[in-house]
Amino acid sequence: KQEVTQIPAALSVPEGENLVLNCSFTDSAIYNLQWFRQDPGKGLTSLLLIQSSQREQTSGRLNASLDKSSGRSTLYIAASQPGDSATYLCAVRGTTDSWGKLQFGAGTQVVVTP
Amino acid sequence: GAVVSQHPSWVICKSGTSVKIECRSLDFQATTMFWYRQFPKQSLMLMATSNEGSKATYEQGVEKDKFLINHASLTLSTLTVTSAHPEDSSFYICSARDSFQAYLAFFGQGTRLTVV
C-alpha cells in the first residue's frame, strides 16, 4: 500500500527566505506526483504536476523535483511572501489504479511572517 | 482552467437527518469523480470513486449505505450523508477527472459539514 509522508509538518519562515518542502512515497510505481496548496477551510489548488518520466517542473517562484527511484519530491518556493502561507499537500497517482486515485500526504503547514 | 463547483460550502444539520452535497464540473465532462474526507490537520482520505452511469466504488471501511453516491450525468455527482451523526462532521472535498485529459483532476472548494 502506498504511503505518502511530508516533512516537516509545520514550518515558519520570515518573508524573503526560500522554502523547502519534502514529500516521500513508499511505492515508486507512480504515474505522476502533484503538489497542491490548501488555504484554511478551502479546497485544493493545483500548483505543479510532475509526470513520472520528468525530473522537475517549474512555475514562477515554484520548482518541484522528482526522484522516483528514491521515492522523493521536493517543492521549492523562492523568496517567500506572506501570501504563501497555507498548507501544501503532495499527492501521487499510482500506475496500478486505472481510475487515477490520488494518495495524499498529511501536508506541511507554512507560515511566512512579514 | 477547469472549474469544479461544490455546493454547499458549509452546512449544519441535526443528528439523524440526511445531507446532500453536490459536485459539478462546469466546463468539462467528468466520467469519474472522487469523494474525499478530511479531518482537522490530517490528509485527505479517499472515500469512494464515482463513475457516471454505474455504481460507485467505495474504499475499505467506508459504509456504502451511509454515504450514498450518485453520478447521474457527466457533470454531476452527489454525496448524501444519511442519518448523520456528530462523528460524520468533517470537510468533504470532491474532485473530477477530465474525460479528455485523464491525467488531470480538479478539486471543488469543499463542504464543511457539522452535525449537532
Image: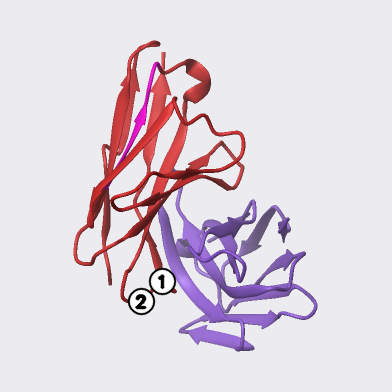
Chain colours: A purple, B red
Q: Residues within 10 Å of mark 1 (few under 14, many from 20)?
A: some
Residue at label 2? B101
- At x 44%, y 67%, the residue is A46
Quick one: which residue is furthest to the front in this view?
Answer: B54
- What segment is highlighted magenta in the picture? B77-83
The quadrant the C terminus of chain B occupies is top left
Q: Is residue B79 magenta?
A: yes
- Horizontal side of A96 relative to A58 (left or right) equals right
Q: Is residue B44 above or below residue B79?
A: below
Residue A111: quadrant of the picture: bottom right
- Residue B51 image point, x, y percent: 36, 53
Real-space CA distance between mark 1 and mark 2, rounded to the nearest whole angstrom = 6 Å
Callout 1 secondary element: loop
Find out whether the residues at labels 1 and 2 contact each other: C-beta distance under 8 Å.
yes
* Magenta portion: prevailing SS class: strand
Residue B32 visible at all: yes
Q: Amino acid at mark 2?
A: Gln
> Is residue A42 something one can see in this rendering?
no
Q: Is residue B75 above or below residue A97?
A: above
Label 2 crowd bin: few (<14), some (14–19), many (20+), radius 10 Å: few
Tally of marks? 2
Q: Residue at x 50, y 40 (%)?
A: B37
Which residue has dot 1 on it?
B104
